[in-house]
Amino acid sequence: MYLNNVFCTLLFIILSIFLPACRVAEWGKQTFYQGCKINVDLSRAREYLRTARVYDQFATQGIFNVLWLSEDVLRAYSKLYAEKFALDENAEMKLFERQKANFNNDIISFYILAYVPGNDDPLIVDKCNGDEIPWKIYLKSGETAYEPILIKEVVFQEEFKIIFDKIFTRFKTQYLVQFNLKDSKTNEPLINPAQPLTLCLNSTKRKVAIIWNLDDQGNLVTQFDEYGICKCPRCPDQTCEACMCAKIK
């Protein structure tokens, strides 16, 4: 009997707290005009988003959110931009083509959000102070690793922040990182589209591989959710192996 009274009392308290809050929230929506939501499907674009969290026991060593600027991502950006500026389909398509030209077929580009405790610029060497780079980044294909041709701190446009969604915070440093896709001398492809695309981040203590699995035509195989959480239980055992044996060319 005593337990029933306690349960009823707790249930009454919980309902007293949450039910009025629901009513207040509904009243607020009805009283204060919320505007119309922009309905752009970002599910495909967010499949190119990956997240790596690296810890030393309980201490955070680094958090990296990586968005591959693929055609699907650029298409989503163009749709969001077109909605904001009321562009028609023709203008939207021209915008999309310009974006593809900016990130041309000879270069693969990534937007990266990086957070490393105690370091505001974890991917770039501070040449003025002579500090060493905390995390080294490279792109792996087969047994070869390629250094980036560009690592630049940038400010993301609002449309890309929306694609990152809740992952984006002002406490993370924003980067544009680019790699060559073709050899500058022979014009031969450096990346095999039939192999997984692997972005590796190495420090003196830890390393992590961020992977996009591709089919034979080089199209993305959906294996992760929109926040980069892997659905495959074996992947945590494969992340370190994915970075091994790769040598800078």
Image: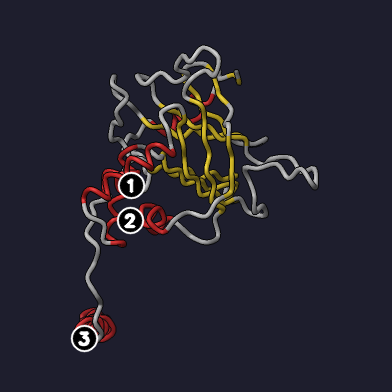
Labels 1 and 3: the sequence-earlier one: 3
> Depth check: 150 or 211 in front?
150
Labels 1 and 2: the sequence-earlier one: 2
Q: Position of residue 110 (x, y in %)?
A: 47, 40
| Residue 34 figure quarter | bottom left
For label 1, the residue is 95
| Residue 137 figure quarter | top right
Q: Work out which quarter of the rendered image holds the C terminus and state it.
A: top right
The span from disc 1 to disc 2 (Cα, nearest Å) is 9 Å
Q: Which SS class for mark 1? A: helix
Q: Against 95, is 241 above or below?
A: above
Q: Amino acid at mark 2?
A: Tyr
Q: Against 6, is 249 above or below?
A: above
- Camera-nearest label, 1 or 2: 1
For label 2, the residue is 81
Callout 1 touching callout 2 (CB < 8 Å): yes
Q: Residue lying farthest right?
A: 129
Residue at image point 53% right, 51% down? 174
Residue at image point 48% right, 15% down? 187
Q: Which SS class for mark 3? A: helix
Q: Position of residue 28 (x, y in %)?
A: 25, 84
> Depth check: 33 or 117 in front?
33
Q: Which SS class for mark 2? A: helix
Indicate left or right for 161 with 17 as reference: right
The span from disc 2 to disc 3 (Cα, nearest Å) is 32 Å
